[in-house]
Image (spheres, rainbow, N blue to C red):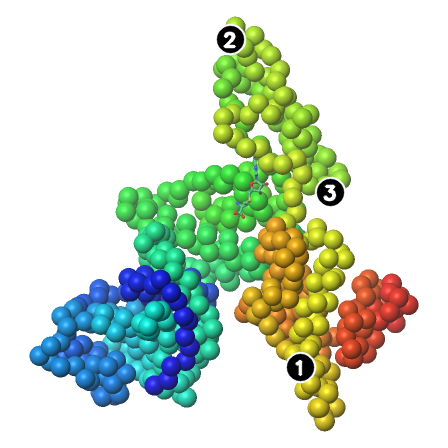
Amino acid sequence: MSQLSEINMTDMRSDSMWSAADVWIKKPHVVNKRLCGVTETEYMDVDTAELIQFLFSLLGPNIKIADISMFLHADVVDKEHETAGRWCVGVRTIIPKVNKTGECLYKEVIIKDNVRHAVTFIPFEETGVEQVTVKSSNIYQIQLQLKPEEWMFSLHALTPEHWWSDGVAYPKLSWLYTKLLPKLSRWALESKTSEFKSTLSLIPVEKYGILYHQLKEKYKALVKVWPEVTDPEKFVFEDVAIATYLLVLWGEERTEKGTTTKQSFVDLGCGNGLLVHILNNEGHPGKGMDIRKRKIWDMYGPGTHLEVCIIGKGRRYRKAEEALVEKQRSDYIKRREALFTASGVSMNVNQNSHYRPNHNDNGQNISTPVNDWVNGFQPREKTETIRNCAALPRDFVDAVVLRVAKALLSLTERNTESSSCGDAWNTGGSMLISEVVNLLDQSSLQALKKECGGLQTLLKNNHQVFRVEGGRVFIRDWRKTTLAQSSRVTSKRKPPPSGAVKTRLCWFHTHHPQGCPLLCEHCAFAHGETDLKNPQR
Ligand SMILES: C[S@@+](CC[C@H](N)C(=O)[O-])C[C@H]1O[C@@H](n2cnc3c(N)ncnc32)[C@H](O)[C@@H]1O
């Protein structure tokens, strides 16, 4: 057994530990994004003998009971003085987002030890009724230990040297302690679980998993043609997930009510309209409305019902006036829409130029500026604030990029100097985003805080220089960049096509102590001013 990682915590109670452990047990998909969720059996309170019996009958002779007992500290139990209600045991089935093996079910026995404040996971695979394979290599335990004056979370694996990972049902051991343990400590401190009911608990998770997989396949092509500036992967798959959820929920509701009529819907503030597109396409009548039309709306086709519309206007008009008001609104929207189409400029409501009729106590029409909104309605700003770091001053961004890149390069400078092989270009080390924060002064951090995604977004936006993966930032090595590493690159590094014009300077050519590792003709970025805007031969 080996203790792999510790997170020190003060002010902890054991029920906080169980709240945190329950998030990982019941909702592992919150942190392992490759999972849809889990289903669980009922948990049973058992004594030690019953626990061993349970393991033996479920997992059969292929489990080494003596090793497991020792790992659980169940071998030293004094039967006479055994704590009643020490153990609580159940089984969960893990549902991956991508169904890799069809028939195989990924399961885990979960053993909660109320005396040692520990929870043990024994993974096994079920391929048939009687066919159970225990994954002895991946048995692990999370424990909350009380040290003098402080609590701490620790992670133990039965045989860490044999640990096996597929990155899905079997995460890497290093992932468990670098990603899961910090999350557990945060959840424990926040003790959030009781505050929110899992939305997935309202629908059958298996159905969700299967449908999500089907819809992802069906709509993934949109990622390639996404005309918006937003991240296609994030938006497409997020909306596929929301649509899946609604479709399963509504399907259950129809079954319950014994009807086949598909539910209708309205999506107010539908944005890119993808959710509406999927729901319409899957047979649900309904429409989306937004104050601003998006480029992608034109790509969906006539089956997707989207409208430009201002939501939130007061509607307290006399019947006779309603038609006139409606016409004025429609005219206004049409004018804005025409402007949008003609200029390609995004559509926004100019509140000051828009008046709506109202009536005074005598029923006479008066005109009031539109900032006389219905109570509690907060209209959006005239201009949409861009908060994805794109509007930060270039000098500021350049300075942050240089600072972070220098820090990464300094981590490995010595290695490259002493390297005897030919490939001595310094690719730098890597840092956690939380470590990068320490490189920046307060005012820079303050400026970044106002942007969506903050520092991480800035680093991701500077895709030419950095690669951000799993919360760590690396220097991008363009010699190795493949499709998997960069969604903006179409294949393993190819020279820029002939006739292509370079529009941006190569950061590495300008700033890296060893220059750019690619030859000028192989680099998509300009090696100096003379290379800029020069058509490639
Ligand atoms: C946070 S976005 C949500 C977009 C989309 N529903 C989603 O989940 O991705 C809010 C949307 O509401 C729209 N919106 C804001 N105020 C509006 C109004 N008064 N009338 C119509 N749409 C509005 C915005 O244009 C924006 O697309």
Which quarter of the figure is the N terminus placed in? bottom left
- Which quadrant would residue 495 be assigned to in this image? bottom right
Residue furthest front in the image: 149
Q: Which mark is residue 412?
A: 1
Q: Amino acid at mark 2?
A: Asp
- Which quadrant would residue 149 be assigned to in this image? bottom left
Pointer 1 or 3: first along the chain = 3
Q: How dense is the environment of label 2, judged by Cα within 10 Å: few (below 14), some, or many (20 and up)?
A: few
Q: Amino acid at mark 1?
A: Thr
Pointer 2 or 3: first along the chain = 3
SS for callout 3: loop
The residue drawn where x is 11% and y is 80% is 79
Pointer 1 or 2: first along the chain = 2
- The residue wearing badge 3 is 344
The residue drawn where x is 72% and y is 59% is 397
Do residues under tags 1 and 2 come within 8 Å of each other at their CB atoms? no
Q: Which mark is residue 361?
A: 2
* Res 519 visible: yes
Of residues 350 and 77, which is closer to you in this image?
77
The residue drawn where x is 30% and y is 78% is 122
Q: Horizontally, is 109 left or right of 220 in the view?
A: left
